[in-house]
Amino acid sequence: MKCWNARIDRRTFAAMVAGSFAASGTSWGQAQGAQGKTVFYASVGPELTVYDVDVEAATLTRRGSVTLPANIHYAWPHPSKRYFYVASSNGGTGTSGIVGERHYANAFRVDPESGALTPHGEVRMLPSRPIHISVDNAGEYALSAHNNPSNVVVHRINRDGTLGGMVSQPAGLNTGIFAHQIRTTPSNRTAILVTRGNNASGGKPEDPGALKVFGFKDGVLTNMASIAPGTGLGFGPRHLDFHPTRPFVFVSVERQNQIQVYRLERDGGLSRGPLFVKTTLAGARDQQPAAGEGAGTIHLHPNGRFAYIPNRAASTVQFQGKDVFAGGENNIAVFKLNEETGEPILIQNIDGRGIKLRTFGIDPTGRLLVAASIMSLLMREGDRVSTLAAGLSIYRIGGDGKLTFVRKYDVDTVKGTQFWSGMLTLP
């Protein structure tokens, strides 16, 4: 790939990127147009619940739910915000070894007044467990990432918002190891598949991670580049997000608890290596993640000045015959971003008030963040053992980007984990 011409006017490039985002509105946690009512969705097992959001009071009010045919893994809105796409599966997490045999993509119509979801069109079967789903910026295709085997599936989206047929892809697509996210870039001419790889375990060597860049046209992906610092060993990316106006891509690196920054090139590709690499952990800046620790998803503030990434841990040890939390960081890392260079500076790690904050949302005004922890777990305090419930933790976002905890709503996860959540402003 060639770097974009340095003589291109920066304002022109920024306007192009910003225009793409304004048209798409597809990034959870970025501005989606604040004219309408904002709602928050969160899943427990196969149940997807919608909450009203009161930004001023920093409260959530549960309004209703729908039940999917299997456990919900991810969801994404159409750019019009009139439709909503949900991927579900009875497959287990990557470490469970449960492949499953029922995998679905469902379309819903979004009520513009309440955010309530109504089934819309035919349910589409997927070939394996979908760990992520997104919609391209034109609203014409739904793309799902599958971790085992690592793969990408593309479905057409019909004019009425229903899911159409699967788009045939060329043989030999380089889909890496353990795909975890698929996103089209702001120009919509390319797509990036984030492949996490795997840590060494049980005598099996480490699997390398990579960012797989594809050309994207008419729903068809074509190999373009594989970005893997070094050989991809010691590089386990999970999710990425795009700056709203600058040519920067911010990557959450799960297996190393890092944030890395890449340049978004004019051709829709990425710089060959990261511009910056920083830890997300609150400890010493050169510390390595403890066993079972990992970084989560990443979202940028709507103004592009801050980035947020949860650190997650859930390993257990035996105490009094019970599995109790072994320790590790469950917090949200807050980074201030340099406007000119994209460099992230860690300014805060705030307690997540739960175990494994897997997903979160930021309201379009940039004043509220809601994070979902996936499970409850026993905690030890001296000789006392208590339960830390799963829940929805609410934080106010200050003008300096820092978070202030407001409240937590406990969530019952007996019937399944709270695996996905996201914020949406209605049209």
Image (cartoon, helix red, strand yellow):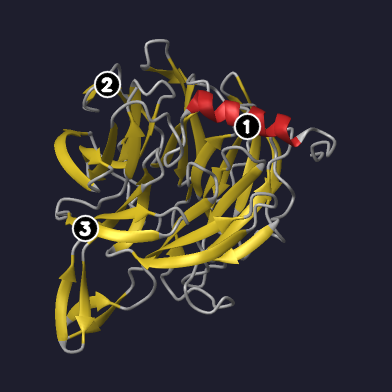
In the displayed structure, 161 sits above or below 351; it is above
- Classify mark 3: helix, strand or loop: strand
Query: Which numbered disc, 3 or 2, marks the residue that appears first in the sequence?
Result: 2
Residue 336 pos. (x, y %): 55, 57
The amino acid at mark 3 is Lys
Query: Which numbered disc, 3 or 1, marks the residue that appears first in the sequence?
Result: 1
Classify residue 165 as left or right of residue 408: right
Look at the image and tell me whether residue 373 can be seen: yes
- Classify mark 2: helix, strand or loop: loop
Disc 1/disc 2 C-alpha distance (Å): 27 Å
- Classify mark 1: helix, strand or loop: helix
Local crowd size for mark 3, using a 10 Å CA cut-off: few (<14), some (14–19), many (≥20): many
| Badge number at residue 408 | 3
Query: Which numbered disc, 1 or 2, marks the residue that appears first in the sequence?
Result: 1
The amino acid at mark 1 is Val
Look at the image and tell me whether residue 197 can be seen: no
Give the labeled residue for mark 2.
Answer: 112
Give the labeled residue for mark 1.
Answer: 17
Q: For the N terminus, give its image quadrant.
A: top right
Q: Quadrant of residue 414?
A: bottom left
Pointer 1 with pointer 2, Cβ within 8 A: no
Classify residue 45 as left or right of residue 4: left
Disc 3/disc 1 C-alpha distance (Å): 36 Å
Classify residue 155 as left or right of residue 245: left
Residue 380 pos. (x, y %): 21, 81
Classify residue 247 as left or right of residue 286: right
Q: Residue at x 74, y 32 (%)?
A: 267
Q: Residue at x 65, y 28 (%)?
A: 16
Residue 206 pos. (x, y %): 57, 65
Pick the front one: 112 or 402 = 402
